[in-house]
Image (tube, rainbow, N blue to C red):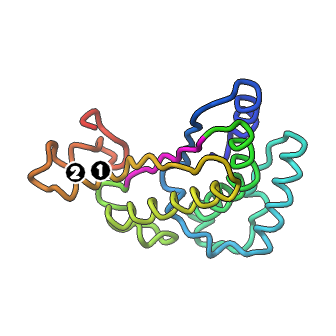
Amino acid sequence: IGRVEGGARDLLSRHGPFDLVVLQDQSQTPGYSTAAVSDADLAAALAALSEAAAKHEHVKVDDFLKEGVDSGARGRGDSGPLNRAETLLRLREFYGPAIAACGAQPVLYSSWGRQHGQDNANAPAFATFEGMLDALTAGTREYAAVLAERGGPPPRIAPAGKAFSLIHDAGPNAPVHFDRLYVADESHPSCAC
């Protein structure tokens, strides 16, 4: 969501109208909390994003969100909370209005949890598949609420993660074993999907 607004702007404005516009964020980003990002930093990032959007320029909101995130997370290269804050700003300031202007219904692709979860200090819910999926689902719903603020057709969610959950929860009665849904990295989907 956060890196293509120039191309998306051109696509939406020059090649529409569209019935649907499908958006997908980096797979983990919706599950992070933005609680560690200060309101002042968000306000500065919003102002920069709005100014850049008016000029049809790209701005990396992370440049304006330097403070307010656990310095240990920065040291580990975990920018998830920053990326999520940036996505929320882009949905509100760019994607929502652009999608509404072309008359399309937004569809948010909701990803799945990693096979065995993920150890992540900035996202404790990621520790298990179920916790990670719940956090991703809640985050995607928040994205939908932000898009709904702009009017137009209500956002829909394509719940790919829910499909993984159904297989997970079915256990031995599932048509395919849960472990077969993933490739060796325990994150990306296999051909069994």
Q: Are marks 2 and 1 in contact (CB under 8 Å)?
A: yes
Measure how far apart labels 2 and 1 are at the Cα level.
Answer: 5 Å
Picture quadrant where residue 7 is located: top right
Q: Residue at x 68, y 42 (%)?
A: 99
Percent x, y of residue 19: 59, 33
Q: Which residue is mark 1?
A: 164
Q: Residue at x 80, y 61 (%)?
A: 46
Question: Start and end of the magenta stretch?
Answer: 105-112
Secondary structure found at label 1: helix
Could you say which is closer to the camera, residue 80 or residue 98? 98
Left-right relation of 64 to 23: right
Which mark, residue 27? Answer: none
Q: Amino acid at mark 2?
A: Ile
Percent x, y of residue 171: 14, 56
Could you say which is closer to the camera, residue 183 or residue 23? 23
Q: Which residue is mark 2?
A: 167
Picture quadrant where residue 117 is located: bottom left
Percent x, y of residue 35: 62, 75
Q: Identify whether 63 is placed above or below 19.
A: below
Q: Identify whether 124 is placed above or below 168.
A: below
Q: Amino acid at mark 1?
A: Phe
Q: Which residue sits furthest left?
A: 172
